[in-house]
């Protein structure tokens, strides 16, 4: 999958072509985090405060991600996922940069996220840190646990 342009489209998380990748995403997270997994399902990703995007290489769905508005100056990265075949090809980076650009366009001062602490999450955490995200205190209605961590990007500069 390398070497192909990634097209990112605003999309419907309930679309049939999203179902398998979203189910895989939720299953994998729950297998590692159990009840501590906070990923949104299609209904949650369809909420009024959430914008959902899919990533495509040609006619192949290679990932998705979402941005949730927490308040008028604070957004949250939600449910980022590259398909198994697209991991380590730049798809995640493309989705994250798209979400960051949209957060800036909306005038958010801060973009935050909650992610896991398991080895499964290490590549995503490295991606977030490379994009400038730093560890932060919990936010929104999240509870701290040994299974999660919180990161934030200052967009005000």
Image (tube, grey):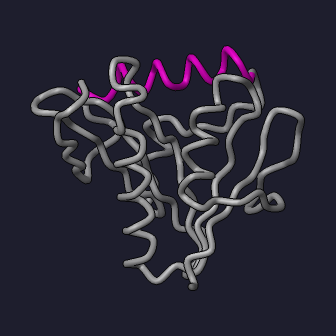
Residue 18 placement, left or right of 28: left
Q: Is residue 152 above or below residue 114?
A: below
- Image quadrant containing the C terminus: bottom right
Q: Is residue 71 above or below residue 115?
A: below
Q: Is residue 127 above or below residue 16?
A: below
Magenta segment boundaries in residue numbering:
16-33
Residue 21 placement, left or right of 44: left
Q: Is residue 64 above or below residue 98?
A: above
Q: Residue at x 63, y 52 (%)?
A: 129
Q: Which residue is drawn at 41% across and 26% down?
A: 87
Residue 63 drawn at (x, y percent):
34, 34
Residue 51 drawn at (x, y percent):
39, 57
Q: Residue at x 64, y 59 (%)?
A: 133
**Foreground residue, 109 or 71?**
109
Per the picture, the main secondary structure of the magenta-coloured stretch is: helix
The answer to whether residue 28 is magenta is yes
């Amino acid at each position: 999958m390398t070497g192909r342009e990634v097209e990112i489209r605003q999309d419907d998380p309930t679309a049939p072509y999203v179902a398998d990748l979203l189910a895989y995403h939720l299953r994998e997270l729950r297998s590692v985090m159990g009840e501590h997994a906070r990923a949104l399902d299609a209904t949650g990703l369809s909420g009024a405060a959430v914008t959902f995007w899919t990533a495509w290489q040609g006619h192949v769905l290679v990932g998705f991600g979402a941005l949730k508005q927490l308040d008028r100056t604070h957004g949250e990265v939600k449910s980022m996922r590259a398909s198994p075949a697209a991991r380590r090809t730049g798809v995640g980076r493309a989705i994250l940069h798209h979400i960051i650009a949209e957060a800036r366009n909306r005038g958010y001062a801060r973009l935050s996220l909650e992610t896991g602490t398991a080895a499964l999450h290490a590549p995503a955490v490295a991606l977030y840190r490379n994009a400038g995200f730093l560890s932060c205190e919990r936010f929104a209605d999240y509870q701290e646990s040994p299974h999660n961590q919180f990161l934030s990007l200052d967009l005000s500069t």
